[in-house]
Image: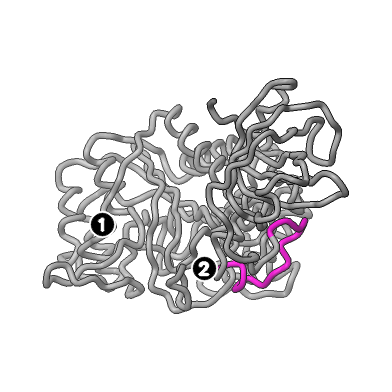
Amino acid sequence: MSRKVIKELNRHIGEKVLISGWVHRIRELKNIVFLILRDRTGLVQCVVDKNNPYIKELKIESVVSIEGIVKEGKNKFNDFEVEVLEIEVLSKALEEPPIEINKEELEVSLDTMLNNRVLSLRHSSQNSIFHIKNIIVKSFREFLCEEGFMEIFTPRIVKEGAEGGTEVFKVNYFGEEAYLAQSPQFYKQMMVIGGFERVFEIGTFFRAESHDTNRHLNEFISMDLEMAFINDEEDIMDMEERLIKYILYKLDVEGKEYVKGFNGGIPVIGETIPRIDINEVAKILKENFNKDLEGRDLDSEGERLIYKYVKEKFNSDFVFVTNYSRKKRPMYTMPKGEEGTRSFDLIFKGVEITSGGQRIHDYNMLVENFKYRGIDPESFSSYTESFKHGAPPHGGLAIGLDRFVALLLNLDNVRICTAFPRDKNRLIP
């Protein structure tokens, strides 16, 4: 007999079925026992004769297979239940779990949750987070494939850091110094220049920043895209706006049952996402919040305040801030005037989730911009050489997946929506 998952059982009323999963709860009555079974699709109430020898041995979270008859019967889980004929114990839980998986809320500290990660992932609230994350990744891929993008896979061990900073993890690569990749930036540009025109990647990247905040990780998932033959950064923002709307639509259609357990629901985007030049942002922050903006850049407080303004004025949870300082953006960013750049950040609920913009596609300009930033272009020759043989106008962006999910679900720490987070204090599990 082939196994059925719980959410399929309503189609098998009156039939004998085989189901398997974890023992979620056991409740003994006078003559029968209610065993609540959990699989990846949900919970089902199973009715067991109290004299069944296996019942006396079972602990919560043991893994079992059950043969039984699906019968109509209203309970808090379904409009049916399973009358148990046979139970096979596949794996016996050896002790009571250190955290209570079968409670409505997972009432443990963040450290306890992460130290017992395999168990905490079984809780419905944690389980839902990763279903939501999966829908976002799947939607990102679907949308871009429909737009003519190709998925690529770039190296994680590199000769130089793509952002030109010092926050890189060093690796001994057969006696040669190498680094863990900070982003796929150079390689996705090289693939565009290589003739593929539109590329994307979903991958894990690394930053060696010694921070310990609720929004940063040292190993994180980035959703990147790069596209050729653009006019300027506005084309990239147009693409991201349509992408975000598609992701939210798919979450509403496919993820309602998972999102409903979190405060806030699907975020508000409106007709269009507001786009505000950093110079205008400076005026808004000064006039409305008496905050001075230094160096054409936004700190975390500035991000929160411009979001507050946009939320009140436009009822949008998103805002694009554009034209950041040339000194604050990476060396490959297309300049705009003397001090600005054709760059943007997408701020969501007061936190930056995307950086993007137009890239420099002219070899001589790129080399000069390296020098302007005090970086030796010779150290990046394998990248810059790509621009000597014709490079189309192009640009792209990167979305921090973990941070996006945390903000979407109003979670107070990005580690909660990371299966096995890596930060300065955590290398296990």
Is residue 266 shown above or below 110? above
Q: CA distance from mark 1 to mark 2?
A: 30 Å
| Pointer 1 or 2: first along the chain | 2
Q: Tag 1's secondary structure? A: helix
Do the CB atoms of the residues marked 1 and 2 lie less than 8 Å apart?
no
Q: What's under tag 2, amino acid-wise?
A: His
For image coordinates 38% across by 73% down, the residue present is: 208
Q: Position of residue 387 (x, y in %)?
A: 20, 48
Specify start and end residues of the magenta stretch as a single range: 101-114
Q: Tag 2's secondary structure? A: loop
In reply to whether residue 63 is colored magenta, the answer given is no
Which residue is under mark 2? 216
Secondary structure, magenta segment, majority class: loop
Which residue is under mark 1? 366
Q: Position of residue 289 (x, y in %)?
A: 74, 71
Q: Position of residue 368 (x, y in %)?
A: 24, 62
Q: What's under tag 1, amino acid-wise?
A: Leu
- Asked whether 55 or 329 is in front, the reply is 55
Q: Position of residue 46 (x, y in %)?
A: 74, 39
